[in-house]
Each structure stands twice: as structure tokens, then as C-alpha cells.
Image (cartoon, rainbow, N blue to C red):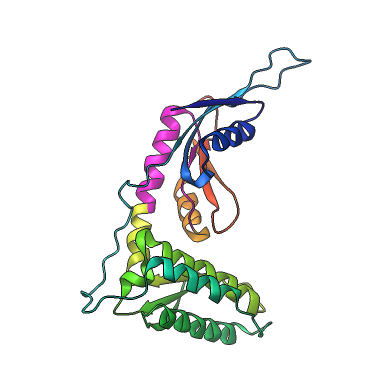
Amino acid sequence: MPIYENLTVAEAIQEGLQVLGITKDQAVIEVLDEGKKGFLGLGKKQARVSIEKRIVEEPAPVEEVPAKPLVEPDPVTTEDASSVMEAAASEPVLLTDLSDEEALAQLGLYLTNISKALNAPALVKTARQDGVIVFHLETQKQGILIGKHGKTLNALQYLAQVYIHRIAKNKLSIVVNVGDYREKRQAILERLASRTAEKVKRTGRPVFLEPMPAFERKQIHSVLSKDAYVQTHSEGDEPYRYLVVEPADKRI
């Protein structure tokens, strides 16, 4: 794995990404040495990181399968879904400062219209769970709304949260689910958190996870908050914000 050096970890990472011609979410990064500033030029040590391009052919955490076989081919692909949702996100929002119930009703209509545009019409139902409003999208074409590796569902999640923040008077936390995808995903995230913590404690180096929605990062943080030997924080901008798991004590 190529190694890059610079004054700080951030600069070393940036240099490596530029050399490889990739973005941070496309890379596997390990911090080998955080470096030292030194005193009056003495004892100064550069930061060292190893970077390689992430292998995209790796098995997906969750393979989404439609609940029922599709009888006819679906003319809308994942690429089409992205363009439809970008258009939905750019639509002007005329309503603002709505009550909770009014805002949730508008969001339900918003998600219904997007599902129709994706040729996967869905019946939208809501439920409150632990202070979060869950929008369940019931459809015969779950595969379209979930997308490869859950990317379409996460895009819907991001759009829903942005939309509700624009129209609602109060701050509301939203989760969009199709079938039992989120439940399966939660179990996988808990296993991922445990494996990542073990790697951090074994190597003494931070691990950068792939970008994921805020509520998924919160799930991993919740699991690892019980481990006194690791700590977590988020970096980057939505929807590409990712979680960093690192040693809580450098003497591990």
C-alpha cells in the first residue's frame, strides 16, 4: 500500500488522494504516524499515511432482493433514479413553518410522488419509534426503491430529511424504510462496529468507514460509546459524511 508523508495527517491524505486521482470516499486510509511538531525545529516528524483505492467489487453489506419476482422489466434504472431524485430535490418548496402533522403529511405526499416517478409506486405509512418518525414505503418493486447497496434508499432518506427541514416549523428526525431493509442493515452495522473497534485496538490506528446517513453513524456511535478504548467522530459533508473510529488512548 503506497505511503505518503506531509506536515499533518490531513495534508498527507490530501497529497495521496491527488496522486491516486481519487476522492476520500473511494479510498482505504490508515494513519501510520500522526507526526510531531517539535520545538524550534527539533524533534519534528512528518505524518505518514497509507492509501489505496477501495475495491468496489467487494460484497455489499446488504443484498436487497424484491419481496416478489418482478413480472415485467423495470424501465427505470439506478442511474435514472439518481436524476429523478436530483430533480425532486431542486423543486421549489412553497410551504414553510408547518406544524408537525402538516409537514409529515406533505412529506408523505412528496415520497409518494417520487416513488411514482421511479416506476415503483408505494403506499406510504408512518410510525413513531424512539423519537424518530419512520416512513415505511410499501411497494411491489422494493429493489428499485432500495437500489444497489441501498444507495437509492439512502438518497431518498437524504431528500426526505432535507425536505422536512425546509417545511417544518420544528426539527423532526426522519427515517425512510422499504421492507425490513433498515432492520437487516442495523444488525450489519452492529457487527461492523464490533469488527472496526477490534481492528482499531489491535493496530492502534484510526479506521475511516464509508459514507453513510446520519442515523446509521449514530447507531455505530451508540454501540462503540460503550467501549472505553475507542472513540468516534464524523468528518465530511452530507451526503458523503463518514465516521472515523480511533483509539481513545494512544497507549493502547
Quadrant hosting residue 137: bottom left
Residue 208 drawn above or below residue 163: above
Query: Residue at the location (50% across, 86% down)?
Result: 109
Query: Considering depth in this image, is 125 or 10 the residue closer to the camera?
Result: 10
Query: Residue at the location (37% across, 83% down)?
Result: 121
Q: Residue 202: within the magenta?
A: yes
Query: Residue at the location (26% across, 71% down)?
Result: 66
| Residue 41 seen in this snapshot | yes
Quadrant hosting residue 46: top right
Look at the image and tell me in which quarter the N terminus lies. Answer: top left
| Residue 173 seen in this snapshot | no
Query: Considering depth in this image, is 171 or 106 the residue closer to the camera?
Result: 106
Residue 195 image position (x, y, % from top left): 37, 41
User: In the displayed image of the protein, which residue is found farthest to the right?
Assistant: 40
Residue 26 image position (x, y, % from top left): 47, 45
Query: Residue at the location (60% across, 33% down)?
Result: 15
Highlighted range, magenta: 189-212
Residue 21 image position (x, y, % from top left): 53, 40
So how many labels did they put on this image?
Answer: 0
Q: Is the magenta stretch mostly helix, strand or loop?
A: helix
Q: Residue 110: within the magenta?
A: no
Residue 232 image position (x, y, % from top left): 53, 44
Residue 224 drawn above or below residue 41: below
